[in-house]
Image: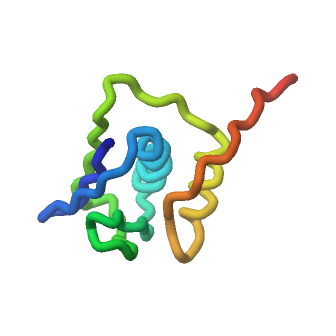
Amino acid sequence: MGKFIYGSPAISVDIDDRTLAHLKVVIVAKLRRGESFAFSWEKSKDSGSGHSSIWLNPAVPLDFEFSGKREPSLNRAWIDELVQVANTPAGLRILPEPPDLPPATT
């Protein structure tokens, strides 16, 4: 289980490494372009259930901590879906992983 850590004072959200790796690609790409956006997630039952949202801004400290030693392989279809939802007014949220796209043939 990895951690998404944001802000000062920091908030920390437990997210499994595979999901966190995909979120990292989308979040870093948007922040690198200077884009601010909302990020929402469902709270665990241990945290009282419900959901939370934050506003991500390039000027705010951000950390991705992974518990595993190896970086998970990335699913291009999942990244594409996360990018699409991140570009909506509601912002980025965790979506279920779709089947991976087959490699393109030329």
Left or right, residue 20 beside residue 22: left
Left or right, residue 106 beside residue 46: right
At x 59%, y 71%, the residue is: 88
- Above or below 21: residue 37: below
Q: Quadrant of residue 11?
A: bottom left
At x 70%, y 41%, the residue is: 99
Q: Position of residue 33 (x, y in %)?
A: 46, 54
The type of colouring in the image is rainbow
At x 63%, y 60%, the residue is: 84
Q: Position of residue 9 (x, y in %)?
A: 12, 64
Q: Which quarter of the image is occupied by the N terminus?
A: top left
Q: Quadrant of residue 20?
A: top left
Left or right, residue 40 beside residue 76: left
Residue toward you, 105 or 35: 105
At x 27%, y 64%, the residue is: 46
Counting every numbered tag in the picture gives 0
In the current view of this chain or complex, which residue is farthest to the right? Answer: 106
In the current view of this chain or complex, which residue is farthest to the front? Answer: 45
- Above or below 57: residue 18: above
Q: Position of residue 24 (x, y in %)?
A: 42, 46
Q: Position of residue 69 (x, y in %)?
A: 32, 24
In the current view of this chain or complex, which residue is farthest to the left? Answer: 9
Q: Which quarter of the image is occupied by the C terminus?
A: top right
